[in-house]
Image: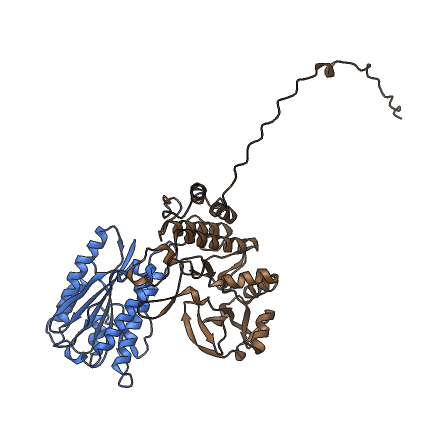
Amino acid sequence: MQILPFYLVCDESGSMSGDIDVLNEALLALHNEISTNPTISDKTRFALIGFSDDAAELQQLVDLGEVSQLPKLEAGGFTSFGSAFRVLRSAIERDVPALKAEGHDVYRPVVFFLSDGVPTDGGWEAAHEALLGSAYRPHIIAFGIGTADRSVIGHVATFKAFMQQGDNVKPAEALKEFAGSLTRSIVRSASGGRAGEGMSLQVDDHVPGFTSVSLDKL
Amino acid sequence: MSGPVATAVADGRDVDLADLALDGIVGAGGQGRIHRLRGGSDLLYKEYLEPARVQAAALTELVQLRRGLDGTARGALDARSAWPLARVLAAGRCTGFLMRTAPDNMLWETGAGSRKPTELQYLLHPERPATAGVVRPTPKQRLVLVRAVVDLLAGLHRHGLVVGDLSQANVLWTVVPEPAVFLIDCDGIRRSGARPVLEQAETPDWGDPLSPFGSDATVDSDRYKAALVVGRVLAQQAYLAPGDPLVPLPGVLNDRQDAAVRRLWEQAAGPFGSRPELPAWSAALDARDVIPVPRLRPPPPRPVDTSLFDDRRAPRGSVRLPPTP
Protein backbone atom coordinates (compact mmCIF):
# COMPACT_ATOMS: atom_id res chain seq x y z
CA MET A 1 0.00 0.00 0.00
CA GLN A 2 1.17 3.53 -0.74
CA ILE A 3 1.07 5.72 2.35
CA LEU A 4 1.23 9.50 2.67
CA PRO A 5 1.90 10.58 6.29
CA PHE A 6 0.62 13.96 7.54
CA TYR A 7 1.94 15.64 10.70
CA LEU A 8 0.01 18.53 12.20
CA VAL A 9 2.43 20.55 14.32
CA CYS A 10 0.43 23.02 16.33
CA ASP A 11 1.31 25.96 18.55
CA GLU A 12 -0.25 25.54 22.03
CA SER A 13 1.40 28.56 23.62
CA GLY A 14 -0.54 30.74 26.07
CA SER A 15 -1.45 33.26 23.39
CA MET A 16 -3.56 30.59 21.63
CA SER A 17 -5.89 30.26 24.64
CA GLY A 18 -8.73 32.32 23.15
CA ASP A 19 -9.08 30.18 20.05
CA ILE A 20 -7.74 26.75 20.91
CA ASP A 21 -11.26 25.29 21.17
CA VAL A 22 -11.97 26.37 17.61
CA LEU A 23 -8.99 24.30 16.56
CA ASN A 24 -10.14 21.32 18.65
CA GLU A 25 -13.53 21.44 16.94
CA ALA A 26 -11.88 21.74 13.55
CA LEU A 27 -9.81 18.64 14.35
CA LEU A 28 -13.02 16.75 15.07
CA ALA A 29 -14.35 17.80 11.67
CA LEU A 30 -11.11 16.65 10.05
CA HIS A 31 -11.39 13.31 11.82
CA ASN A 32 -15.02 12.96 10.75
CA GLU A 33 -14.18 13.64 7.12
CA ILE A 34 -11.18 11.30 6.84
CA SER A 35 -12.23 8.46 9.14
CA THR A 36 -15.54 7.98 7.32
CA ASN A 37 -13.76 7.62 3.98
CA PRO A 38 -11.92 4.28 4.03
CA THR A 39 -10.26 4.94 0.67
CA ILE A 40 -8.59 8.08 2.04
CA SER A 41 -7.84 6.80 5.54
CA ASP A 42 -6.21 3.67 4.09
CA LYS A 43 -3.66 5.72 2.18
CA THR A 44 -2.90 8.42 4.69
CA ARG A 45 -1.71 8.59 8.29
CA PHE A 46 -2.14 11.46 10.70
CA ALA A 47 -0.09 12.60 13.70
CA LEU A 48 -0.55 15.56 16.04
CA ILE A 49 2.33 17.32 17.77
CA GLY A 50 1.63 20.20 20.15
CA PHE A 51 4.30 22.64 21.24
CA SER A 52 4.66 25.41 23.82
CA ASP A 53 7.46 25.33 26.42
CA ASP A 54 8.33 21.99 24.94
CA ALA A 55 6.75 19.69 22.38
CA ALA A 56 4.84 16.43 22.70
CA GLU A 57 3.45 13.84 20.32
CA LEU A 58 -0.19 14.13 21.30
CA GLN A 59 -1.26 11.59 18.71
CA GLN A 60 1.29 9.24 17.22
CA LEU A 61 0.98 8.57 13.51
CA VAL A 62 -2.25 6.62 13.01
CA ASP A 63 -4.88 5.60 10.48
CA LEU A 64 -7.71 7.99 11.41
CA GLY A 65 -10.21 5.24 10.63
CA GLU A 66 -8.87 3.33 13.61
CA VAL A 67 -9.14 5.95 16.34
CA SER A 68 -12.31 6.95 18.11
CA GLN A 69 -10.82 9.92 19.97
CA LEU A 70 -8.19 12.57 19.48
CA PRO A 71 -6.21 14.35 22.21
CA LYS A 72 -7.26 17.89 22.98
CA LEU A 73 -4.97 20.84 22.33
CA GLU A 74 -4.52 22.96 25.48
CA ALA A 75 -2.95 26.41 25.54
CA GLY A 76 -0.24 27.52 27.98
CA GLY A 77 3.44 28.44 28.04
CA PHE A 78 5.94 29.82 25.55
CA THR A 79 6.64 29.05 21.90
CA SER A 80 9.54 26.66 21.50
CA PHE A 81 9.95 26.03 17.76
CA GLY A 82 13.17 24.12 18.47
CA SER A 83 11.39 21.47 20.58
CA ALA A 84 8.71 21.13 17.91
CA PHE A 85 11.22 20.41 15.17
CA ARG A 86 13.22 17.99 17.35
CA VAL A 87 10.14 15.97 18.35
CA LEU A 88 8.88 16.04 14.76
CA ARG A 89 12.20 14.80 13.41
CA SER A 90 12.44 11.88 15.81
CA ALA A 91 8.80 10.95 15.12
CA ILE A 92 9.36 10.96 11.36
CA GLU A 93 12.59 8.98 11.65
CA ARG A 94 10.79 6.36 13.74
CA ASP A 95 7.53 6.27 11.71
CA VAL A 96 8.77 6.06 8.14
CA PRO A 97 10.98 2.99 8.68
CA ALA A 98 8.17 1.38 10.71
CA LEU A 99 5.69 1.85 7.83
CA LYS A 100 8.25 0.50 5.38
CA ALA A 101 8.83 -2.51 7.61
CA GLU A 102 5.08 -3.22 7.34
CA GLY A 103 5.57 -3.44 3.59
CA HIS A 104 4.21 -0.03 2.63
CA ASP A 105 5.58 2.37 0.04
CA VAL A 106 5.95 5.58 2.01
CA TYR A 107 5.78 9.03 0.46
CA ARG A 108 7.72 12.01 1.77
CA PRO A 109 5.93 13.13 4.95
CA VAL A 110 3.85 16.30 4.87
CA VAL A 111 3.91 18.73 7.77
CA PHE A 112 1.23 21.35 8.41
CA PHE A 113 2.85 23.78 10.84
CA LEU A 114 0.76 26.41 12.66
CA SER A 115 1.99 29.16 14.96
CA ASP A 116 0.50 32.37 16.33
CA GLY A 117 3.72 33.93 17.54
CA VAL A 118 7.46 34.30 17.26
CA PRO A 119 9.78 31.59 18.54
CA THR A 120 10.81 32.18 22.15
CA ASP A 121 13.73 29.76 22.08
CA GLY A 122 17.14 30.52 20.67
CA GLY A 123 18.70 28.03 18.33
CA TRP A 124 15.45 26.82 16.76
CA GLU A 125 16.99 27.31 13.31
CA ALA A 126 19.52 24.54 14.05
CA ALA A 127 16.70 22.12 14.95
CA HIS A 128 14.85 23.16 11.77
CA GLU A 129 17.97 22.59 9.71
CA ALA A 130 18.51 19.17 11.29
CA LEU A 131 14.91 18.26 10.39
CA LEU A 132 15.48 19.27 6.77
CA GLY A 133 18.74 17.31 6.80
CA SER A 134 16.90 14.12 7.71
CA ALA A 135 16.85 11.27 5.21
CA TYR A 136 13.03 11.66 5.32
CA ARG A 137 13.06 15.45 4.89
CA PRO A 138 9.39 16.42 5.00
CA HIS A 139 7.46 18.93 2.90
CA ILE A 140 6.46 21.74 5.27
CA ILE A 141 3.41 23.95 4.77
CA ALA A 142 3.52 26.74 7.36
CA PHE A 143 0.64 28.95 8.55
CA GLY A 144 1.08 32.07 10.66
CA ILE A 145 -1.74 33.72 12.58
CA GLY A 146 -1.89 36.50 15.19
CA THR A 147 1.55 37.90 15.90
CA ALA A 148 3.46 35.31 13.88
CA ASP A 149 6.37 36.72 11.91
CA ARG A 150 6.03 36.59 8.15
CA SER A 151 9.72 35.97 7.51
CA VAL A 152 9.89 33.23 10.17
CA ILE A 153 6.86 31.45 8.64
CA GLY A 154 8.46 31.81 5.21
CA HIS A 155 11.67 30.30 6.58
CA VAL A 156 9.96 27.33 8.27
CA ALA A 157 8.04 26.32 5.14
CA THR A 158 9.55 24.29 2.32
CA PHE A 159 6.44 23.93 0.15
CA LYS A 160 3.95 26.73 0.79
CA ALA A 161 3.43 29.39 3.45
CA PHE A 162 0.44 31.48 4.44
CA MET A 163 -0.11 34.44 6.78
CA GLN A 164 -3.43 35.48 8.28
CA GLN A 165 -4.79 38.57 6.51
CA GLY A 166 -4.45 41.56 8.85
CA ASP A 167 -7.01 42.36 11.50
CA ASN A 168 -10.11 42.03 9.34
CA VAL A 169 -10.02 38.24 9.67
CA LYS A 170 -10.74 36.79 13.12
CA PRO A 171 -8.21 34.18 14.33
CA ALA A 172 -11.09 31.71 14.86
CA GLU A 173 -12.08 32.03 11.19
CA ALA A 174 -8.47 31.67 10.12
CA LEU A 175 -8.07 28.52 12.21
CA LYS A 176 -11.17 26.96 10.66
CA GLU A 177 -9.82 27.73 7.19
CA PHE A 178 -6.44 26.31 8.19
CA ALA A 179 -8.02 23.01 9.28
CA GLY A 180 -10.22 22.96 6.18
CA SER A 181 -7.17 23.42 4.00
CA LEU A 182 -5.40 20.55 5.79
CA THR A 183 -8.45 18.29 5.33
CA ARG A 184 -8.68 19.14 1.62
CA SER A 185 -4.98 18.47 1.23
CA ILE A 186 -5.34 15.00 2.75
CA VAL A 187 -8.40 14.12 0.65
CA ARG A 188 -7.07 15.49 -2.64
CA SER A 189 -3.58 14.09 -2.25
CA ALA A 190 -4.95 10.61 -1.55
CA SER A 191 -7.66 10.61 -4.22
CA GLY A 192 -5.85 12.44 -6.99
CA GLY A 193 -3.11 11.18 -9.18
CA ARG A 194 -3.49 9.23 -12.38
CA ALA A 195 -3.92 5.51 -12.51
CA GLY A 196 -0.62 3.72 -12.33
CA GLU A 197 1.07 6.79 -10.95
CA GLY A 198 1.62 7.60 -7.32
CA MET A 199 -0.06 10.13 -5.10
CA SER A 200 1.09 13.70 -5.33
CA LEU A 201 0.89 16.33 -2.62
CA GLN A 202 -2.03 18.71 -3.24
CA VAL A 203 -2.18 21.93 -1.24
CA ASP A 204 -4.54 24.89 -1.79
CA ASP A 205 -2.92 27.76 -3.68
CA HIS A 206 -5.17 30.18 -1.83
CA VAL A 207 -6.59 29.72 1.64
CA PRO A 208 -9.44 32.11 2.55
CA GLY A 209 -8.35 34.54 5.25
CA PHE A 210 -4.67 34.07 4.44
CA THR A 211 -2.16 35.59 2.06
CA SER A 212 0.55 33.52 0.47
CA VAL A 213 4.09 34.05 1.68
CA SER A 214 7.02 33.61 -0.64
CA LEU A 215 9.45 31.05 0.66
CA ASP A 216 13.04 31.66 1.62
CA LYS A 217 15.32 31.04 -1.29
CA LEU A 218 18.19 28.72 -0.51
CA MET B 1 -41.11 21.59 -9.59
CA SER B 2 -42.94 23.68 -12.16
CA GLY B 3 -42.41 26.36 -14.79
CA PRO B 4 -39.94 26.48 -17.63
CA VAL B 5 -37.39 24.24 -15.89
CA ALA B 6 -39.92 21.45 -15.40
CA THR B 7 -41.08 21.50 -19.00
CA ALA B 8 -37.52 21.69 -20.30
CA VAL B 9 -36.56 18.65 -18.22
CA ALA B 10 -39.65 16.78 -19.39
CA ASP B 11 -38.77 17.50 -23.02
CA GLY B 12 -34.98 17.26 -22.68
CA ARG B 13 -34.72 20.86 -23.91
CA ASP B 14 -31.94 23.23 -22.86
CA VAL B 15 -32.49 25.33 -19.75
CA ASP B 16 -31.38 28.93 -19.39
CA LEU B 17 -29.13 29.44 -16.38
CA ALA B 18 -31.14 32.59 -15.57
CA ASP B 19 -34.24 30.42 -15.01
CA LEU B 20 -32.53 28.41 -12.25
CA ALA B 21 -32.96 29.47 -8.62
CA LEU B 22 -29.68 28.25 -7.14
CA ASP B 23 -29.77 27.42 -3.46
CA GLY B 24 -26.24 26.75 -2.29
CA ILE B 25 -23.39 24.42 -3.21
CA VAL B 26 -23.70 20.85 -1.97
CA GLY B 27 -20.54 19.42 -3.45
CA ALA B 28 -17.42 20.31 -5.38
CA GLY B 29 -14.91 18.34 -7.36
CA GLY B 30 -12.04 18.94 -9.71
CA GLN B 31 -14.28 19.71 -12.68
CA GLY B 32 -17.34 21.33 -11.25
CA ARG B 33 -19.65 22.30 -8.46
CA ILE B 34 -23.06 20.88 -7.60
CA HIS B 35 -25.82 23.36 -6.75
CA ARG B 36 -29.11 22.68 -5.04
CA LEU B 37 -32.16 24.33 -6.59
CA ARG B 38 -34.64 26.32 -4.54
CA GLY B 39 -38.21 25.22 -4.02
CA GLY B 40 -37.86 21.67 -2.78
CA SER B 41 -36.85 20.43 -6.21
CA ASP B 42 -35.19 17.02 -6.44
CA LEU B 43 -32.95 18.41 -9.17
CA LEU B 44 -29.32 19.45 -8.92
CA TYR B 45 -27.32 21.65 -11.24
CA LYS B 46 -23.77 20.58 -12.03
CA GLU B 47 -21.80 23.62 -13.05
CA TYR B 48 -18.56 23.12 -14.97
CA LEU B 49 -15.65 25.22 -13.76
CA GLU B 50 -14.26 25.49 -17.28
CA PRO B 51 -17.22 25.67 -19.68
CA ALA B 52 -14.86 26.41 -22.57
CA ARG B 53 -13.60 22.83 -22.41
CA VAL B 54 -17.04 21.22 -22.41
CA GLN B 55 -18.02 19.03 -25.38
CA ALA B 56 -21.62 20.21 -25.43
CA ALA B 57 -22.53 17.72 -28.17
CA ALA B 58 -21.58 14.79 -25.96
CA LEU B 59 -23.95 16.10 -23.31
CA THR B 60 -26.71 16.53 -25.92
CA GLU B 61 -26.24 12.91 -26.89
CA LEU B 62 -26.75 11.72 -23.30
CA VAL B 63 -29.86 13.90 -22.85
CA GLN B 64 -31.35 12.76 -26.17
CA LEU B 65 -30.58 9.12 -25.52
CA ARG B 66 -32.70 9.28 -22.38
CA ARG B 67 -35.46 11.12 -24.26
CA GLY B 68 -35.50 8.36 -26.86
CA LEU B 69 -36.24 5.62 -24.32
CA ASP B 70 -39.76 4.38 -23.77
CA GLY B 71 -41.41 5.30 -20.48
CA THR B 72 -40.48 2.09 -18.68
CA ALA B 73 -36.83 2.19 -19.70
CA ARG B 74 -36.56 5.89 -18.90
CA GLY B 75 -38.10 5.33 -15.48
CA ALA B 76 -35.61 2.54 -14.82
CA LEU B 77 -32.69 4.75 -15.88
CA ASP B 78 -33.91 7.62 -13.69
CA ALA B 79 -34.28 5.30 -10.70
CA ARG B 80 -30.73 4.03 -11.08
CA SER B 81 -28.68 7.04 -12.14
CA ALA B 82 -28.13 10.77 -11.90
CA TRP B 83 -28.46 10.95 -15.69
CA PRO B 84 -28.12 14.34 -17.40
CA LEU B 85 -31.73 15.48 -17.91
CA ALA B 86 -31.18 18.79 -19.67
CA ARG B 87 -28.25 21.02 -20.58
CA VAL B 88 -27.92 24.40 -18.93
CA LEU B 89 -26.86 27.30 -21.14
CA ALA B 90 -25.72 30.83 -20.38
CA ALA B 91 -25.44 33.20 -23.33
CA GLY B 92 -25.57 30.21 -25.65
CA ARG B 93 -22.67 28.42 -23.98
CA CYS B 94 -23.19 25.14 -22.13
CA THR B 95 -22.27 25.68 -18.47
CA GLY B 96 -23.52 22.40 -17.04
CA PHE B 97 -26.59 20.20 -16.76
CA LEU B 98 -29.49 19.25 -14.52
CA MET B 99 -29.70 15.87 -12.83
CA ARG B 100 -31.71 14.22 -10.11
CA THR B 101 -30.46 13.99 -6.51
CA ALA B 102 -29.46 10.59 -5.20
CA PRO B 103 -32.24 8.84 -3.29
CA ASP B 104 -32.36 9.78 0.37
CA ASN B 105 -31.85 6.16 1.44
CA MET B 106 -28.40 6.24 -0.19
CA LEU B 107 -27.08 8.69 2.39
CA TRP B 108 -25.82 7.68 5.81
CA GLU B 109 -25.25 9.65 8.99
CA THR B 110 -21.77 9.82 10.51
CA GLY B 111 -21.16 9.83 14.25
CA ALA B 112 -20.68 13.59 14.04
CA GLY B 113 -24.13 13.95 12.48
CA SER B 114 -23.14 14.80 8.90
CA ARG B 115 -24.74 12.98 5.98
CA LYS B 116 -22.55 11.33 3.37
CA PRO B 117 -23.35 9.38 0.22
CA THR B 118 -23.19 5.61 0.70
CA GLU B 119 -20.49 4.97 -1.87
CA LEU B 120 -19.44 1.61 -3.24
CA GLN B 121 -16.29 1.88 -1.08
CA TYR B 122 -18.27 0.81 2.01
CA LEU B 123 -18.80 -2.57 0.34
CA LEU B 124 -15.06 -2.93 -0.23
CA HIS B 125 -13.86 -2.27 3.31
CA PRO B 126 -14.84 -4.02 6.53
CA GLU B 127 -16.83 -1.98 9.01
CA ARG B 128 -14.86 0.32 11.33
CA PRO B 129 -16.08 2.40 14.25
CA ALA B 130 -16.23 5.51 12.07
CA THR B 131 -18.33 3.79 9.38
CA ALA B 132 -20.66 1.90 11.70
CA GLY B 133 -23.53 4.16 10.58
CA VAL B 134 -23.64 2.45 7.18
CA VAL B 135 -26.36 -0.23 7.15
CA ARG B 136 -24.46 -3.17 5.77
CA PRO B 137 -25.80 -5.92 3.50
CA THR B 138 -26.38 -9.52 4.44
CA PRO B 139 -24.40 -11.96 2.27
CA LYS B 140 -27.47 -12.47 0.05
CA GLN B 141 -28.03 -8.73 -0.29
CA ARG B 142 -24.37 -8.30 -1.21
CA LEU B 143 -24.94 -10.62 -4.15
CA VAL B 144 -28.06 -8.69 -5.20
CA LEU B 145 -26.08 -5.43 -5.10
CA VAL B 146 -23.25 -6.81 -7.26
CA ARG B 147 -25.77 -8.10 -9.76
CA ALA B 148 -27.54 -4.74 -9.79
CA VAL B 149 -24.29 -2.92 -10.68
CA VAL B 150 -23.50 -5.45 -13.41
CA ASP B 151 -27.02 -5.22 -14.87
CA LEU B 152 -26.84 -1.43 -14.84
CA LEU B 153 -23.54 -1.47 -16.74
CA ALA B 154 -24.81 -4.15 -19.10
CA GLY B 155 -27.76 -1.90 -19.96
CA LEU B 156 -25.42 0.97 -20.83
CA HIS B 157 -23.25 -1.29 -23.00
CA ARG B 158 -26.35 -2.49 -24.82
CA HIS B 159 -26.95 1.13 -25.80
CA GLY B 160 -23.39 1.40 -27.14
CA LEU B 161 -22.24 3.51 -24.18
CA VAL B 162 -19.11 3.19 -22.08
CA VAL B 163 -18.68 4.43 -18.53
CA GLY B 164 -14.95 5.05 -18.30
CA ASP B 165 -14.37 6.17 -14.74
CA LEU B 166 -16.01 3.40 -12.75
CA SER B 167 -14.74 3.50 -9.17
CA GLN B 168 -15.45 3.12 -5.47
CA ALA B 169 -16.88 6.63 -5.42
CA ASN B 170 -19.38 6.80 -8.26
CA VAL B 171 -21.78 4.01 -7.47
CA LEU B 172 -24.11 4.54 -4.49
CA TRP B 173 -26.11 1.75 -2.87
CA THR B 174 -28.54 0.87 -0.12
CA VAL B 175 -30.20 -2.19 1.37
CA VAL B 176 -33.02 -0.19 2.99
CA PRO B 177 -35.79 -1.02 2.32
CA GLU B 178 -34.26 -3.32 -0.28
CA PRO B 179 -30.99 -3.55 -2.22
CA ALA B 180 -30.60 -0.89 -4.91
CA VAL B 181 -27.75 0.94 -6.64
CA PHE B 182 -27.44 4.39 -8.19
CA LEU B 183 -24.79 5.58 -10.65
CA ILE B 184 -23.48 9.13 -10.23
CA ASP B 185 -21.06 11.29 -12.25
CA CYS B 186 -22.92 10.12 -15.36
CA ASP B 187 -21.58 12.94 -17.53
CA GLY B 188 -18.42 10.85 -17.92
CA ILE B 189 -20.46 8.28 -19.88
CA ARG B 190 -20.07 8.51 -23.63
CA ARG B 191 -20.83 6.63 -26.83
CA SER B 192 -18.11 4.05 -27.37
CA GLY B 193 -15.36 5.70 -29.37
CA ALA B 194 -16.70 9.25 -28.90
CA ARG B 195 -15.20 12.02 -26.80
CA PRO B 196 -16.70 12.56 -23.36
CA VAL B 197 -18.20 15.84 -22.13
CA LEU B 198 -14.91 16.49 -20.34
CA GLU B 199 -11.72 14.47 -20.33
CA GLN B 200 -11.98 12.24 -17.28
CA ALA B 201 -9.32 11.50 -14.73
CA GLU B 202 -9.18 7.82 -13.87
CA THR B 203 -9.39 6.88 -10.21
CA PRO B 204 -6.21 5.39 -8.73
CA ASP B 205 -6.48 1.59 -8.24
CA TRP B 206 -9.25 1.44 -10.88
CA GLY B 207 -7.23 1.62 -14.08
CA ASP B 208 -6.99 -1.11 -16.71
CA PRO B 209 -3.27 -1.99 -16.68
CA LEU B 210 -3.40 -3.70 -20.07
CA SER B 211 -5.35 -1.17 -22.11
CA PRO B 212 -3.39 0.05 -25.12
CA PHE B 213 -5.54 3.21 -24.96
CA GLY B 214 -4.33 4.29 -21.50
CA SER B 215 -7.12 5.70 -19.39
CA ASP B 216 -9.47 6.24 -22.37
CA ALA B 217 -12.81 4.53 -21.91
CA THR B 218 -13.26 1.41 -24.00
CA VAL B 219 -15.77 -1.43 -23.89
CA ASP B 220 -13.06 -3.84 -22.79
CA SER B 221 -11.66 -1.65 -20.01
CA ASP B 222 -15.24 -1.17 -18.79
CA ARG B 223 -15.46 -4.96 -18.68
CA TYR B 224 -12.21 -5.07 -16.72
CA LYS B 225 -13.54 -2.51 -14.24
CA ALA B 226 -16.80 -4.45 -13.94
CA ALA B 227 -14.67 -7.45 -12.96
CA LEU B 228 -12.97 -5.25 -10.35
CA VAL B 229 -16.38 -4.30 -8.92
CA VAL B 230 -17.56 -7.90 -8.84
CA GLY B 231 -14.39 -9.32 -7.28
CA ARG B 232 -13.88 -6.50 -4.80
CA VAL B 233 -17.49 -6.45 -3.58
CA LEU B 234 -17.82 -10.24 -3.35
CA ALA B 235 -14.55 -10.54 -1.41
CA GLN B 236 -14.82 -7.18 0.43
CA GLN B 237 -11.26 -6.46 -0.71
CA ALA B 238 -10.70 -2.89 -1.93
CA TYR B 239 -7.55 -3.56 -3.93
CA LEU B 240 -8.21 -7.03 -5.35
CA ALA B 241 -7.57 -7.37 -9.09
CA PRO B 242 -7.82 -10.16 -11.66
CA GLY B 243 -4.75 -12.34 -11.23
CA ASP B 244 -5.17 -12.31 -7.43
CA PRO B 245 -7.00 -15.23 -5.84
CA LEU B 246 -10.68 -14.39 -5.36
CA VAL B 247 -12.18 -15.56 -2.07
CA PRO B 248 -15.80 -14.38 -1.81
CA LEU B 249 -17.19 -13.66 1.67
CA PRO B 250 -18.89 -16.72 3.15
CA GLY B 251 -22.53 -17.20 2.26
CA VAL B 252 -22.60 -14.85 -0.72
CA LEU B 253 -22.39 -17.36 -3.58
CA ASN B 254 -23.70 -20.88 -3.98
CA ASP B 255 -21.46 -23.55 -5.49
CA ARG B 256 -22.65 -22.99 -9.04
CA GLN B 257 -22.22 -19.23 -8.83
CA ASP B 258 -18.84 -19.65 -7.17
CA ALA B 259 -17.52 -21.88 -9.95
CA ALA B 260 -18.91 -19.58 -12.66
CA VAL B 261 -17.51 -16.44 -11.01
CA ARG B 262 -14.07 -17.99 -10.63
CA ARG B 263 -14.01 -18.92 -14.32
CA LEU B 264 -14.85 -15.35 -15.35
CA TRP B 265 -12.41 -13.88 -12.80
CA GLU B 266 -9.67 -15.92 -14.42
CA GLN B 267 -10.77 -14.77 -17.86
CA ALA B 268 -10.70 -11.13 -16.69
CA ALA B 269 -6.95 -11.45 -16.08
CA GLY B 270 -6.47 -12.19 -19.77
CA PRO B 271 -5.25 -9.82 -22.48
CA PHE B 272 -7.08 -6.64 -23.51
CA GLY B 273 -10.01 -7.54 -25.71
CA SER B 274 -10.77 -10.84 -23.99
CA ARG B 275 -12.43 -9.79 -20.73
CA PRO B 276 -15.81 -11.33 -19.89
CA GLU B 277 -18.83 -9.53 -21.33
CA LEU B 278 -21.29 -8.13 -18.83
CA PRO B 279 -24.10 -10.60 -19.61
CA ALA B 280 -21.67 -13.40 -18.70
CA TRP B 281 -21.30 -11.89 -15.23
CA SER B 282 -25.08 -11.49 -14.99
CA ALA B 283 -25.53 -15.15 -15.79
CA ALA B 284 -22.81 -16.23 -13.35
CA LEU B 285 -24.34 -14.19 -10.55
CA ASP B 286 -27.94 -15.07 -11.35
CA ALA B 287 -29.92 -16.40 -8.42
CA ARG B 288 -31.62 -18.82 -10.74
CA ASP B 289 -30.04 -22.21 -10.72
CA VAL B 290 -29.39 -23.86 -14.03
CA ILE B 291 -30.84 -27.22 -15.08
CA PRO B 292 -28.19 -29.36 -16.68
CA VAL B 293 -29.66 -30.39 -20.02
CA PRO B 294 -29.39 -34.17 -20.54
CA ARG B 295 -27.10 -34.76 -23.45
CA LEU B 296 -28.97 -36.43 -26.31
CA ARG B 297 -27.38 -39.66 -27.50
CA PRO B 298 -27.29 -39.76 -31.30
CA PRO B 299 -29.09 -42.77 -32.81
CA PRO B 300 -26.80 -45.59 -33.93
CA PRO B 301 -25.90 -45.35 -37.63
CA ARG B 302 -28.17 -47.27 -39.89
CA PRO B 303 -26.58 -50.30 -41.54
CA VAL B 304 -25.42 -49.45 -45.00
CA ASP B 305 -27.57 -50.88 -47.78
CA THR B 306 -24.83 -51.99 -50.14
CA SER B 307 -27.34 -52.71 -52.88
CA LEU B 308 -27.69 -48.90 -53.29
CA PHE B 309 -24.14 -48.78 -54.59
CA ASP B 310 -24.69 -51.53 -57.16
CA ASP B 311 -24.32 -50.29 -60.69
CA ARG B 312 -27.89 -50.66 -61.85
CA ARG B 313 -27.93 -47.89 -64.44
CA ALA B 314 -27.52 -48.18 -68.14
CA PRO B 315 -24.26 -46.99 -69.67
CA ARG B 316 -24.11 -43.18 -69.77
CA GLY B 317 -24.93 -41.50 -73.12
CA SER B 318 -23.32 -38.38 -74.62
CA VAL B 319 -24.54 -34.91 -75.82
CA ARG B 320 -23.68 -33.79 -79.26
CA LEU B 321 -22.12 -30.30 -79.40
CA PRO B 322 -22.80 -27.93 -82.31
CA PRO B 323 -19.87 -27.67 -84.70
CA THR B 324 -17.59 -24.68 -84.16
CA PRO B 325 -17.61 -22.22 -87.09
The N terminus of chain B, quarter of image: bottom right
Residue B69 position in % (x across, y down): 60, 61
Q: Which residue is rendered at x = 24% and y = 62% of the image?
A: A67
Q: Is residue B192 visible?
A: no
Q: Which residue is rendered at x = 52% and y = 48% of the image?
A: B279
Q: Which chain is brown?
A: B
Residue A47 position in % (x across, y down): 22, 64
Q: Which residue is rendered at x = 36% and y = 52% of the image?
A: B236
Position above or below: A140 against B307: below
Residue B292 position in % (x across, y down): 52, 37
Position above or below: B232 against A213: above
Q: Determine whether, in the image, residue A210 is placed left or right of residue B301.
A: left
Residue B43 position in % (x across, y down): 50, 72
The residue lying furthest to the front in this view is B177
Nearer the observer, B75 or A170: B75
Q: Quadrant of residue A83?
A: bottom left
Position above or below: B84 against B295: below
Q: Which chain is blue?
A: A
